[in-house]
Image (cartoon, rainbow, N blue to C red):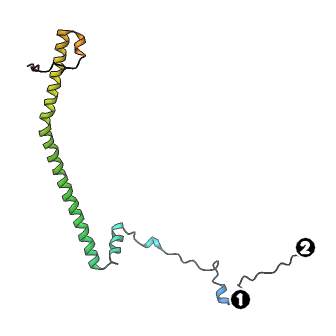
Amino acid sequence: MVGVKIEEIDSGMESLPESSKDLTPEKIPVIEDDYENEEDETLLERLLGLTEMFPENIRNVTYYSWIGCKNGFKQFYCFSRSAAWIFFSTSTILFAPLLFEIERVQIQTAQLNQQKQVLLGPATALSPANTLTPGMPVIPSQ
């Protein structure tokens, strides 16, 4: 085996004065805070305490901006409710007669097809309903 010379490594403790040797991390006295005697703060109290670090004009601008945004959203919500009511009620009033008329025409077409089938046989019911010769008037049944 090769001879290995092991040197002692200086930890630096010998070069410190005696008063600092007592303050090594192992020997530092631990000061325990007594948190049990303090009252718990609520979130509102903490936020209120944080506002004190800002100047009053910044707090006022922030407050009035918040109030303005809140009122703006309220007005937009009220307007959108009214606009939606007007749009849907008007469309119902305007388009309901159109939908009823389309349904009535479809029922009449179905009745004409049924009459054709009864009179001319089942083969004519499969043909389109409006296959009339040109110039022939369409007489609606009532």
Q: Nearer the viewer, residue 135 or 132?
A: 135
Q: Residue furthest bottom?
A: 17
Q: Position of residue 19 (x, y in %)?
A: 65, 89
Q: Amino acid at mark 2?
A: Val
- Secondary structure under badge 1? loop
Callout 2 crowding tier (Cα within 10 Å): few <14, some 14–19, many ≥20:
few
Vertical relation: 46 (above or below) 55 = above
Disc 2, disc 1: CB below 8 Å? no
Q: Which residue is mark 2?
A: 2
Q: Position of residue 141 (x, y in %)?
A: 9, 19
- Residue 20 occupies quadrant: bottom right
Q: Position of residue 85 (x, y in %)?
A: 16, 47
Q: Residue furthest right?
A: 1
Q: Nearer the viewer, residue 107 or 124?
A: 124
**Which one is earlier in the sequence, the residue at label 2 or at label 1?**
2
Q: Position of residue 108 (x, y in %)?
A: 14, 22
Identified at 24% across, 64% down, the residue is 69
Identified at 17% across, 44% down, the residue is 88
- Residue 97 occupies quadrant: top left
Vertical relation: 46 (above or below) 135 = below
The quadrant of the image that shows the N terminus is bottom right
Q: Amino acid at mark 1?
A: Ser
Identified at 22% across, 20% down, the residue is 128
- Secondary structure under badge 2? loop
Left or right, residue 18 beside residue 73: right
Between the residue at mark 2 and the residue at mark 1, the CA separation in whole angstroms equals 33 Å
Q: Which residue is mark 1?
A: 15
Which numbered disc covers residue 44? none
Vertical relation: 128 (above or below) 97 = above
Q: Nearer the viewer, residue 94 or 115?
A: 115
